[in-house]
Image (tube, rainbow, N blue to C red):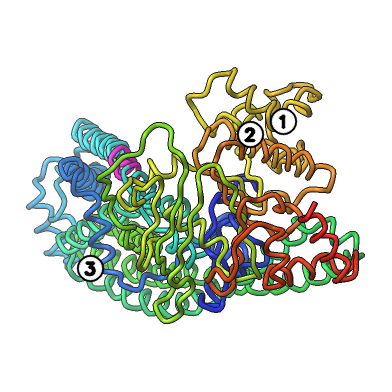
Amino acid sequence: MSTNEKLSTRPGEEDPAQPADAPVTDALEDDDDFVEEEFVPGEADGGMFGSVPAKKPEHFWPSAKRLMGLLKPEAAGIYLVLAMVTVAVVLNVIAPKILGQAMDVIFSGVVGKQLPSGVSKDQFVEGLRSQGQDNFADMVSRMELVPGVGIDFQKLAFLISVVLVMYFVANVFLWLQGYVLNVLVMRVVRKLRDDTEKKLNKLPLNYFDTRQRGDLLSRVTNDVDNIQQALQQAFAQLVSSLLTVVGIVIMMFIVSWQLALIALVALPLSGVAAGIIGSRSQKLFAAQWKNTGQLNGQIEESFSGHDLVRVFGRDADMLDRFDERNEALYKASFGAQFVSGIIFPVMQFVSYLSYVGIAVVGGLRVASGGMSLGDATAFIQYSREFTQPLGQMAGMANMLQSGVASAERVFELLDADEQDAETATEHLPAKTDGHVEFRNVTFSYTPDKPLIEDLSFNAEPGHTVAIVGPTGAGKTTLVNLVMRFYELDSGSISLDGVDITHLSRSELRSKVGMVLQDAWLFGGSIYDNIKYGNLDATDDQVMEAAKATFVDRFVRALPEGYDTVIDEEGNNVSAGEKQLITIARAFVANPSLLILDEATSSVDTRTEVLVQKAMAALRSDRTSFVIAHRLSTIRDADTILVMEAGRIVEQGNHHALLELKGAYYRLYMSQFAGEDAEESAFTAESAAVRS
């Protein structure tokens, strides 16, 4: 998302009735009405440097069960995958045994060729026993040989062919199961993305108020990707590794239960080593990611405030802070990688101890005739393959744990309470008058701290209603209630006599146009940004809106005109030009009700004149709500509402309110006392009224 792509709406102001620490992250705001909850980029969200691995799940088994439940619609495909994995594992596990038989054919042929021909094997064995060579006799008795006859190449070729075919078929099945599983998982993840997107559109605005925007973005992007990775890799690999371990253990006991016991002794030793080292490395990895987040935050801060850093000459200070955090990350990363890197060598060492024991005991058993050379060879291969799936299971278990943790975060989003269901029972005509009436409206963000209490007033059709007041008075909250971003605690708001709760939210908002303090432009051309207000608008309507709002004046000077693409930072148009484009966007929507939230606060005085003229054209024949801190911009408003602590303390036009010498008078004089003395200013205003 580009930096100029911000959320277009913002909830109510920070006020005494709202918790001071309530995090608010949207972009519709009076800057001084809100305090965003501070967070370190790169920790809670993906930031500009990628995502941080999910933490351990708090409720692993319920979340894992629900995660597996996502695969339920693809049950037939999952069973097919399991069947193919099973076939592949069985073939891979049996192949070493057959390869051992091929080794016996070679060894028997070599030994048989050296024996005197003309005697049977039994006669030769009896001769060896009579000479006291019992061990050699036992070994020969286990062999399928004919004295004087060499290697049976036909049988050898058959066995090798069987092994090659088994390995080939096994790998074909493994490829097929991977292909099928990817298709199934992609379908599941696509549905999960659809569900999360639909859920976001059903959540009330207060859900976003209490959560960091970066964290929500991370849930619907990084966490879903992590779930996909866990399902694609961990699921099949865990099943394959588990079946492989079981199959190898069975085959080892079939070949030699004595050697199998030696091989299994390594398991608890490896488990203890991995557990001790793993717990230590986990703490170090946590420190690594914490320091990574802090360093990423430092880098992002340095780049975002690059100009300011240069202006105040803080380059050296920022570099020192970077070096400090970079050093901390280096130490944490080195420790984490060093400790985690010990796990594999330790497990390999334990595996080699087992391997040495198997080789020695196996050799003695072959020499004593306790087992054939082929069986010993097969067992050694089994013992070497035994540790590989164990290591894979450990790695996949960590990946699955991370995937379940991500699933838990996504499920928390999916389980969040949705906004009140639509109760649309009435409709508005295509063109409405824009008569807005508040009747005994009461609203609070938290039940114990009321904000707006028993508020009533009328906004007549075509009139401009300005809303002023100190920070936290409830100005932005008021217009958010009109938009149904929040639901009332009591009372009602009606548009042209229809209670807005009886309208669908989409129909209500289709009658309202908004111009925000922060000019938000989408990635795309200037033409596309204007037309966003009404996708059905014709080219003539877009041009008319651009000319009426003075956008056409500066667009004509651009090399590509209306096809000029807004760059990632939105730096190829000025702040005032951005604001004019947003006004044109509202103009082309042709709304019945207009909301202007401090739309001139971020532009210079000269551009403000153009913006004011554009807004005057936009307000023509429309009911308008204007939130303003610059009182000079709302002198011509039909009605000015002065709010304090969620209540309307005064209302009237500019001159009438000045004559009252009340709350509005104090606000006005606080802005203009530096220009003239209080009495002379008031006298001038009174004279203007009389004239």
Foreground residue among 7 and 260: 7
**Residue at (70% x, 49% y) in the render:** 636
Could you classify mark 1 by the number of other residues whose Cα lies within 10 Å: few (under 14), some (14-19), or many (20 or more)?
many
Answer left or right for 613 relative to 457.
right
Please state the horizontal and vertical placement of residue 625, each as a whole percent of the image: 57, 51
State the residue position of label 2: 584
Secondary structure at badge 2 equals: helix
Q: Amino acid at mark 3?
A: Ala
Foreground residue among 382 and 320: 320
Q: Based on the displayed image, in which of its 4 quarters is residue 675 positioned?
A: bottom right
Secondary structure at badge 3 equals: helix
Secondary structure at badge 1 equals: helix
The reply to whether the C-beta atoms of the residues labelled 2 and 1 are less than 8 Å apart is: yes
State the residue position of label 1: 551
Residue 175 shows in the view: yes
Q: Based on the displayed image, in which of its 4 quarters is residue 572 positioned?
A: top right
State the residue position of label 3: 260
Q: Amino acid at mark 2?
A: Ala
Please state the horizontal and vertical placement of residue 346, each as a whole percent of the image: 47, 72
